[in-house]
Image: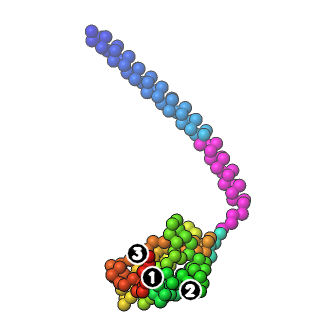
Amino acid sequence: MVRNFKYLGIILIVISVLALLGHEIKVYHQAKVDYVIYQKNYADLKKHYKKIKKKKRKVVIVKDKTDEVIKAANEVLALEKNFTEMRQKYGYINMKKQPEYKDIQLGLGRYLSKTGTFNPQSSPWNYDPTWEGKVYVGGFNQNRYPVTFVYTKDDKVMMLVSAQYLIKKNKFSQYQMYNTNEGQQATFYGDTQSEK
């Protein structure tokens, strides 16, 4: 019986060695195949790199248009101020009959584009002609400049209008308007007639 265990142990060791050897041979052959594929890919990449290296590459430098954006934003602020003053002077209904109304609309149309159902030219942004407007321009990012129009009165922020200045269109778009608590509590327009 002990003899049988001895032979059984030897047989198990031989089988284990053969299995391990078979596994190592399989791993070796797979490594050879992987190495051949790697060499082929490396040669292809080297050829491609040589082609790219021979070609002259163009580097497009985008001209900084911050000054242009600031100029357009300040023009919008001036038009918005005129728009607010006209609305306060004539009221919502009568202002549309004034000859300067069309001039303001054309001026704003040059700089402001409609976004969805929002038409930024339909009525003024700022609610009070005494509010002072300032412009803050962010850094260039993907063909656009982020711009924030800040309206203040007595050093209190009354309203913020954020927009994107699109370089390709040379227009402002994607508006978001925020009124602060002070801005909402302020008197809106001071109209003398109803908006109905």
Residue kind at label 3, given as amino acid type:
Tyr
Crowd around label 2: few <14 · some 14–19 · many ≥20 (10 Å): few
Magenta stretch containing residue 7, yes or no?
A: no
Q: With 12 as the anchor, is 24 left or right in this view? A: right
Please identify the residue farthest to the top as the structure is shown: 1
- Identify residue for label 3: 178
The image shows residue 46 at horizontal and vertical percentages of 66, 51
Instruction: Give the residues in magenta.
Output: 38-59
Q: Secondary structure at mark 3?
A: strand
Main SS of the magenta part reads helix
Magenta stretch containing residue 56, yes or no?
A: yes
Q: Earlier in the sequence, mark 1 or mark 2?
A: 2
Crowd around label 3: few <14 · some 14–19 · many ≥20 (10 Å): few
Q: Earlier in the sequence, mark 2 or mark 3?
A: 2
Going 56% across and 86% down the picture, which residue do you hit?
98
Residue kind at label 1, given as amino acid type:
Asn
Cα gap from disc 1 to disc 2, whole angstroms: 20 Å
Crowd around label 1: few <14 · some 14–19 · many ≥20 (10 Å): many
Labels 2, 3: front one: 2
Quarter of the image that includes the N terminus: top left
What's the mark number on residue 126?
1
